[in-house]
Image (cartoon, rainbow, N blue to C red):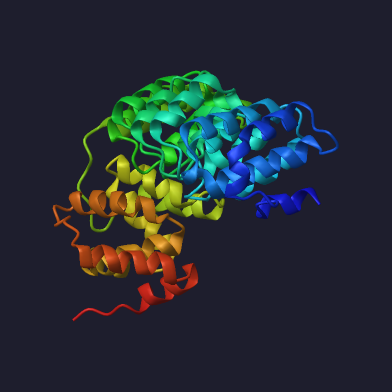
C-alpha cells in the first residue's frame, strides 16, 4: 500500500492546499494515519502541485517533509528518491532535501538528477559524507568547479572514483593535484595513466614514483639482479622523458618484441594505446593497434591515417576505446605525423554513429574491409 502513494496524489487536490496547517498537525499527531503515508502524500502533492504553491505553502511542506524524514522508513525514502532521480519537473528543494539524506537515499539523485546545479553539488560535498562525495565523483559530466573541489579530498575512494569517471571534466591544475597525490596513493596510478586527457608532461612526471612501485613489485615476484633491474627501469624512464621520436618504417625490432610480449601475456589493452600515444611513442602505438585489430602494420597505418575520422572511430570502437576519448586519440595521432586535425560537424556526426550503432566486432570487420584508391 505504501508504494502506491509514490505514483498518486493520494486524494489530495488543490482544494486541500487551502488548509496546509492540517497537514502540519497530522505530521505531529498522525491520528491513525502512518507517518509514511503522510510523508508520501505530502511529497506526492509537492511533486505534482509544486509550481502552484505559494512561498508559505512551499516552506510549510518542506518543513513537514524535513520533520518526518527521520521517522520514515529508509526504503520509502529510497523509493521516492529513485522515482525523482530523472524527473526534470520535480521541486528543486525536494530534490535537495533527499540529496542531503543518508547516502542510500541520496545516491540516485547525486548520480542522476539533472536538477542539481554546480552550486548545489558543491554545498552537498561540503556538508555530506565521504560516500556523498564518492557518488558525486561518479556523476556523469561533472564540471571543472566540481572536480576542483573533489580533488581536495583525502579519501582514496573519492579520488579513484573521480579518475575512473571518463566523462568528468578535469582541469590541468586538478590533474596536477591528482598526480602529486598518486605519489602516496598507489590506487590512483593505474587509472590516471589510463585517462586519455592526462597531460603528457604529468604522465612523464609520474614515471619517477611509478617506476619505484614497479621495482618493488618485480623484486618481490621475479628473481632479477638489482643492478640489472635499476638499469632497465632507468633506461625506460629516460626513453619516456626524451623528445618523441618520429615514426620509423619499419619500427625498431625491440618495439615489435615488446608488443608481442604484451599480447602473449594478455597485457596489451586499450589503456596501453592511450598511454604510449600521450608519451609520443608513435611506433609503439601503431604496432599495438595493428596487433589489437588484427591487421599487418602497413595496412593498419594506411587505413588509420588515410581513412579519415571514420577509420579512426572504427579502430577505437573495435579495441574498446570510449567515444569520449576519440578526440584525444584522433588529435594526438595526427599531430605526431603533422596531419590535419580539424573535425567538421559532419565528421563528428559520422563518428557518433560509429560508436552508437556499430558493434566492436562489426567495427573491426568494416575497418579491415576499407579500400583506398
Image-based side of 163 in relation to 336, left or right = right
Which residue lies at the image location 43% right of the left edge and 41% below the top edge? 194
**Residue 296 in sight:** no
330 and 206: which is toward the camera: 330
92 and 315: which is toward the camera: 92
229 and 140: which is toward the camera: 140
Quadrant assignment for the C terminus: bottom left
Residue 44 position within the rendered picture, expressed as x and y whole percent measured from the top left: 63, 46
Q: Is 87 rendered above or below residue 217?
A: below
Give the total of numbered labels: 0
Q: Is 159 rendered above or below residue 369?
A: above
**Residue 38 in sight:** yes
Residue 152 position within the rendered picture, expressed as x and y whole percent measured from the top left: 44, 19
Residue 46 position within the rendered picture, expressed as x and y whole percent measured from the top left: 57, 42
Image-based side of 317 in relation to 87, left or right = left
Which residue lies at the image location 45% right of the left edge and 42% below the top edge? 115
Q: Residue furthest right?
A: 32
Residue 109 position within the rendered picture, expressed as x and y whole percent measured from the top left: 56, 41
Image-based side of 214 in relation to 180, left or right = right
Which residue lies at the image location 72% right of the left edge and 26% below the top edge? 70
182 and 162: which is toward the camera: 162
Image-based side of 43 in relation to 261, left or right = right
Amino acid at each position: 500500500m505504501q508504494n502506491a502513494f509514490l505514483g498518486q496524489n493520494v486524494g489530495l487536490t488543490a482544494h486541500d492546499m487551502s488548509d496546509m496547517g492540517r497537514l502540519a498537525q497530522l505530521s505531529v499527531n498522525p491520528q491513525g494515519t502512518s507517518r509514511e503515508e503522510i510523508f508520501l502524500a505530502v511529497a506526492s502533492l509537492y511533486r505534482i502541485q509544486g509550481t502552484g504553491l505559494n512561498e508559505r505553502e512551499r516552506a510549510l511542506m518542506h518543513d513537514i517533509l524535513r520533520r518526518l524524514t527521520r521517522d520514515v522508513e529508509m526504503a520509502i525514502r529510497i523509493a521516492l528518491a529513485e522515482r525523482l532521480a530523472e524527473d526534470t519537473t520535480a521541486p528543486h528543494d525536494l530534490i535537495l532535501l533527499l540529496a542531503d539524506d543518508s547516502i542510500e537515499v541520496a545516491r540516485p539523485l547525486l548520480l542522476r538528477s539533472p536538477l542539481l546545479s554546480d552550486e548545489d553539488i558543491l554545498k552537498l560535498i561540503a556538508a555530506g559524507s565521504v560516500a556523498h562525495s564518492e557518488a558525486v565523483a561518479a556523476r556523469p559530466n561533472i564540471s571543472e568547479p566540481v572536480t576542483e573541489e573533489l580533488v581536495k579530498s583525502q579519501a582514496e575512494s573519492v579520488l579513484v572514483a573521480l579518475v575512473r569517471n571518463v566523462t568528468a571534466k578535469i582541469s590541468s591544475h586538478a590533474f596536477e593535484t591528482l598526480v602529486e597525490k598518486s605519489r602516496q596513493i598507489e590506487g590512483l596510478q593505474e587509472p590516471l595513466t589510463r585517462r586519455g586527457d592526462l597531460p603528457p608532461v604529468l604522465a612523464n612526471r609520474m614515471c619517477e614514483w611509478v617506476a619505484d612501485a614497479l621495482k618493488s613489485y618485480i623484486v618481490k615476484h621475479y628473481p632479477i639482479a638489482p643492478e640489472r633491474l635499476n638499469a632497465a627501469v632507468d633506461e625506460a624512464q629516460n626513453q619516456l622523458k626524451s623528445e618523441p621520436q618520429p615514426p620509423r618504417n619499419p619500427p625498431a625490432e625491440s618495439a615489435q618484441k615488446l608488443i608481442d610480449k604484451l599480447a602473449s601475456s594478455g597485457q596489451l589493452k586499450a589503456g596501453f594505446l592511450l598511454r604510449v600515444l600521450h608519451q609520443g611513442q608513435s611506433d609503439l602505438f601503431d604496432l599495438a593497434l595493428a596487433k589489437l585489430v588484427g591487421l599487418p602494420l602497413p595496412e593498419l597505418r594506411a587505413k588509420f591515417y588515410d581513412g579519415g575520422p571514420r577509420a579512426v572511430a572504427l579502430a577505437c570502437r573495435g579495441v574498446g576505446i570510449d567515444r569520449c576519448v576519440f578526440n584525444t586519440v584522433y588529435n594526438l595521432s595526427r599531430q605526431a605525423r603533422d596531419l590535419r586535425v580539424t573535425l567538421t560537424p559532419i565528421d563528428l556526426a559520422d563518428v557518433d554513429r560509429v560508436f552508437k550503432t556499430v558493434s566492436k566486432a562489426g567495427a573491426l570487420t568494416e575497418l579491415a574491409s576499407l579500400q583506398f584508391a
